[in-house]
Image: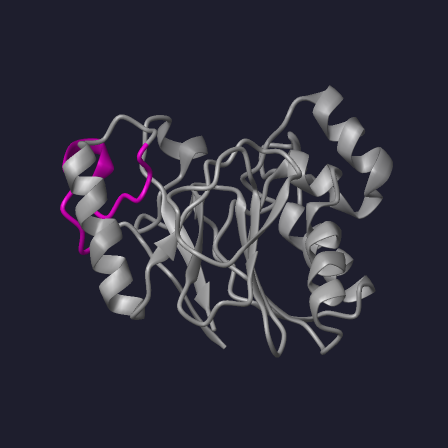
Amino acid sequence: MKYLFTDNTRGSSAGVFLSRNFGDHVGDDAQSVARVRSDLSLEVGAPVLFMEQIHGERVAVVNQHNGPVASTDALITQSPGLALAVMVADCIPLLLRNETSVAAVHVGRRGLMNGISTKVIKTMRSLDSSPITAVVGPAICKNCYEVSEDVFFQVTSKYPHAAALSGRGNYTLDLVGVLIDELRLDDIAVQNESSCTVETPTLYSYRRDGVTGRQVGVIWL
């Protein structure tokens, strides 16, 4: 499987975006963002297609690069000349592959509740019935993702095993654990490469820093 996860090092951004920020919607210098995106395409050997992510459930099947795909949180392609990117700074970057297609999926709390991973899997299987492998990348961990009581019970009413507590005794959610369980229920082989974005200084974290950049997960055929 051809994929990678970036961190916040080896880029050209400055200040709070130091230094490898791929987000063009967070207030960073546009030229710096364009430069790191261009460098990423050179690194993977293919044009990299981004999404304008909205924490929704839209899945788009794409075969060429016509600029960022609007209002989408999952991309699927069967084109060998195209790489797919998902931007994150606490949400889960999910990468999927079978014999003839790859997918990049943005899985936050709302995406998890909307079942976006299952929708992507169904779409991939409609294109190709071969086995799917998943890679789960860096995201906020169950010890750091503190939420309000109402959000906690909204999520745990559907996913009881998401329930957790922080070291301070506050309500938290284990989104990574739930996603991995859901993938395995869908008969997906899962490779867990998650590390906590809040606890890792070389990763961007919106929960930790507020104004911050975005790292990416990228996959290609």
Q: Give the residue drawn at x 63%, y 27%.
A: 147
Image x and y of residue 177, in percent: 68, 54
**In the rendered image of this protein, does residue 200 appear above or below residue 32?**
below
- Please identify the quarter of the rendering in which residue 21 is found: top left
**Is residue 170 highlighted in magenta?**
no
Q: Give the residue drawn at x 33%, y 38%.
A: 23
Image x and y of residue 30, in percent: 20, 34
**In the rendered image of this protein, does residue 146 appear above or below residue 183?**
above
Left/right of residue 169 with respect to residue 195 in the rendered view: right
Residue closer to the observer: 204 or 26: 26
Residue closer to the observer: 40 or 157: 40
Which of the colour schemes (rainbow, by chain, secondary structure, one colour) is used?
one colour
- Please identify the quarter of the rendering in which residue 211 is found: top left
Image x and y of residue 80, in percent: 45, 72
**Is residue 17 highlighted in magenta?**
yes
Q: Main secondary structure of the magenta part?
A: loop
Residues rendered magenta in the picture: 10-24
Image x and y of residue 141, in percent: 56, 47
Q: Give the residue drawn at x 71%, y 77%.
A: 131
**In the rendered image of this protein, does residue 70 appear above or below residue 176?**
above
Left/right of residue 215 with respect to residue 183 in the rendered view: left
Q: Give the residue drawn at x 75%, y 44%.
A: 115
- The count of marks equals 0
